[in-house]
């Protein structure tokens, strides 16, 4: 994807403007994680686990990215969902944003997942 066609991921239709309590936000975040697991054909335990296989890491980062753009959860809250530090979440989100600029497959995955959600 070139710079002229760069998607504005922060303009993705989100649920962040709705008045949701923390339990509802966590439930929606868990739904996002479940749908990403289904999309990438991995288990919930794998995405939240410590394994660093490329497919699992990509799915984990994609989940973090979608949760952040859709729900605007704090980085620490997203990290808590995965047993990770907030700086790891920052890296994961930045990684997906950077990859989407140069890799059409990542851009396509983002679009497909947004449609699924």
Image (cartoon, helix red, strand yellow):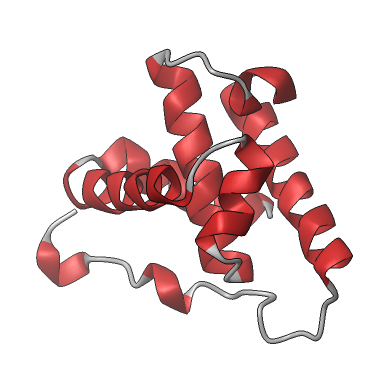
Q: Going by the image, does 37 lie left or right of 101?
A: right
Dividing the picture into quadrants, the one containing residue 21 is bottom right
> At x 81% / y 68%, what residue is drawn?
22
Residue 88 appears in view: yes
Q: Going by the image, does 59 lie left or right of 38?
A: left
Dividing the picture into quadrants, the one containing residue 66 is bottom right
The one nearer the camera, 17 or 35, is: 17
Task: Please state, as top left, top right, bottom left or bottom right, where the C terminus lies in the image.
Answer: bottom right
> At x 69% / y 48%, what residue is drawn?
32
Q: Is residue 17 above or below residue 22?
A: below
Whole-percent x, y for residue 38 in the image: 69, 28
Q: Is residue 92 above or below residue 42?
A: below
Residue 43 appears in view: no
Whole-percent x, y for residue 36 in the image: 63, 37
Dividing the picture into quadrants, the one containing residue 49 is top right
The one nearer the camera, 21 or 43, is: 21
Q: Going by the image, does 5 lie left or right of 9?
A: left
Q: Is residue 103 above or below residue 28?
A: above
């Amino acid at each position: 994807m070139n710079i002229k066609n760069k998607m504005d991921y922060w303009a993705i239709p989100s649920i962040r403007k709705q008045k949701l309590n923390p339990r509802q936000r966590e439930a929606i975040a868990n739904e996002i994680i479940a749908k990403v697991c289904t999309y990438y054909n991995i288990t919930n335990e794998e995405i939240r686990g410590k394994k660093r296989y490329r497919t699992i890491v990509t799915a984990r980062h994609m989940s973090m990215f979608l949760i952040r753009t859709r729900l605007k959860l704090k980085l620490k809250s997203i990290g808590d969902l995965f047993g990770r530090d907030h700086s790891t979440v920052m890296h994961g989100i930045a990684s997906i944003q950077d990859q989407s600029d140069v890799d059409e497959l990542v851009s396509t995955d983002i679009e497909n997942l947004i449609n699924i959600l």
